[in-house]
Image (cartoon, grey):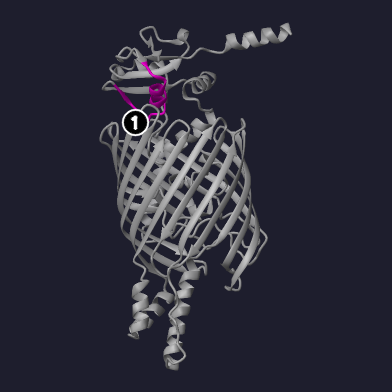
Amino acid sequence: MKYNFFKIILLSTIVTTNSFSKEWDFLSVNGYGSLGLAYQNNKDVLYRSSLQTPKGSAGDLSFSNYSNLGLQIDAQATKDLTFTLQGILSENNNAEGLFELAWANAKYQVNNNLSVKVGKMRLAAFMDSDILDVAYSYDMVKLPSMYSNIPFQNYSGIEIQHQLNFDDISLISTLFYGQADSFVYNNYLKKADISLTEMKGVMLQLISNNLTLRFAFNKNNLKINEGKSSDEMNQLSALNIPIINQTLQKYKIEQIEYLALGGKYEWGNSYFKGEYIKLNTNSFLADMRSWYLNVGYEFENFSPYVLYSKSSSKSAFKGISIEEEMPLALRGVLNATNQGLQYTYNAGSINSEVSSLGFRYNLTQNSVLKFQYDYLQEKDLVSYNTKELIDVNVHVFSSAVNFIF
Amino acid sequence: MMKYFILLLSMILLEAKVDIVVSPSCHIDELSSYEVKKLFMIKQTVIDNQVITVLDNKDQNLYQEFLKEYLNKSPRKMKVYWTRMLFTGKKVAPKKFSLKLVNSEENNNTCYMSYMEAKQKPQEWSILRIK
């Protein structure tokens, strides 16, 4: 909360600017929001919408999952230079409190095809990542699980985008470099601070009349600090036992990288969409594979859809083998090390299948009503109550009103 | 049967023909339908080294007709497109056409492009041929 003063100034600036923007032609103020609720009936499961929150539905009704309010100011300083500020109030933020400054950047349009952005931006890991909070712009109440399993949503840095236009085809290439500070509440709902440096990424997007194809690759240096368990690992390392130090060194958390592929095809009023991600850490943290398929149809004001998504985790880490002939004290320490590493794996692993059915209904030009039913099957989930690993089947009912203004 | 025929005929006759029009500062006679689409979605802003400022029509029926004929999009899809562009800081939707805007002195040399029925076209503006 060290930037509270700045945030208050920013929020009041957004509000006061709104009243002047009609007279100042170079400024525009726009906003969006959602009022949503989620319900599932299993008290052993915490159904949440992001890793950045310990709140959600645990066998009860939750307003935390989807509700948010965002405001954006765009200022056209010159013909080629624009500034964008976007603040969001939400429980699912990548910030300590309710308020998050999600976008704060300057964009310079070098020419018709090339632009450079500097400042704070959304990390566009997936096709809809950069409009994750603007639920008005997509059909689902909640985007597929892969969207909420990325532990970082923003970065500060530089982004260069180039667009190549052919007749009815555009090829958009984006390169970025930056850094980010984030946090997650892991599966045990323990908070872990995450620091990413030297974030390097490339995105390629091919857009034709009906087809969009997307490729993204991102590699970052990673540091995680999860209080007690990080301290325990440091203590084990301090014992100077070669087999432990070799293991800790071999599976040290140093880097995280992902490869994401996506595609969307529209024909008439129908669309077919799918995405895939492979997220690796080369450490004892869980690696993740996740994909989904989504089909929808647009009637005049009513758009039903179905969705299937699957996420699974595995680790390169194998526990240290403990031999009978080892001294008892050493076996105890090795056991503790294996348990510690297993805890770290469990804390971040995910093995789920979700089948979803839902619809969007246009209430007015600027507001929509949505409903979604999810049948969620999870394996080796950390129980919300007992903290044991359990297998569960959960029925989730979600609804939201999304609007823009 | 005759009743339905008359109804159908009147619907066809009532459907506005939407033309693409440009202000006198524009040195363009014709465009391809791809170029029209890209200009009005602001994926492209320059044609033959000339910067073009597109303007939407305030008339909702005409807007829908234009979307159907030239952009092959529903109003909802366009709304979503501009929402996405706006909240990702990429671009904002075109301003609405008004005589006050296009006739203002500071915009005298701007090349404006819009769409309207031929009878609504300002006198000095010209209708583009679409290839």
Residue A143 visible within the image: no
Q: Which residue is mark 1?
A: A165
* Subunit of label 1: A
Q: Is residue A212 visible?
A: yes
Q: What amino acid is labelled 1 in the image?
A: Asn
Whether B36 is among the magenta residues is yes
Quadrant of the frame with the N terminus of chain B: top right
Q: Residue at x 48, y 32 (%)?
A: A210
Q: Position of residue A7 (x, y in %)?
A: 39, 53
Residue drawn where x is 35% and y is 19% of the image: B112
* Badge 1 density bin: few <14, some 14–19, many ≥20, Cα 10 Å: some
Residue at point 40% right, 41% down? B88
Residue A163, percent from left and from top: 33, 35
SS at mark 1 in the image: strand
Image quadrant for the C terminus of chain B? top left
Query: Residue at point 59% right, 69% down?
Result: A383
Spot occupied by residue A155 in the image (x, y as percentages of width and height): 35, 53
* Residue A8: % across, % down: 40, 52
Query: Which residue is nearer to you in this view: A4 or A358?
Result: A358
Is residue A250 highlighted in magenta? no
Q: Image check: A372 left or right of A197?
A: right
- Residue A128 or residue A400, whichever sits in front: A128
| Region in magenta | B31-47
Question: From the viewer's perspective, is A56 left or right of B84?
Answer: right
Question: Where A285 sits versus B88, above or below?
Answer: below
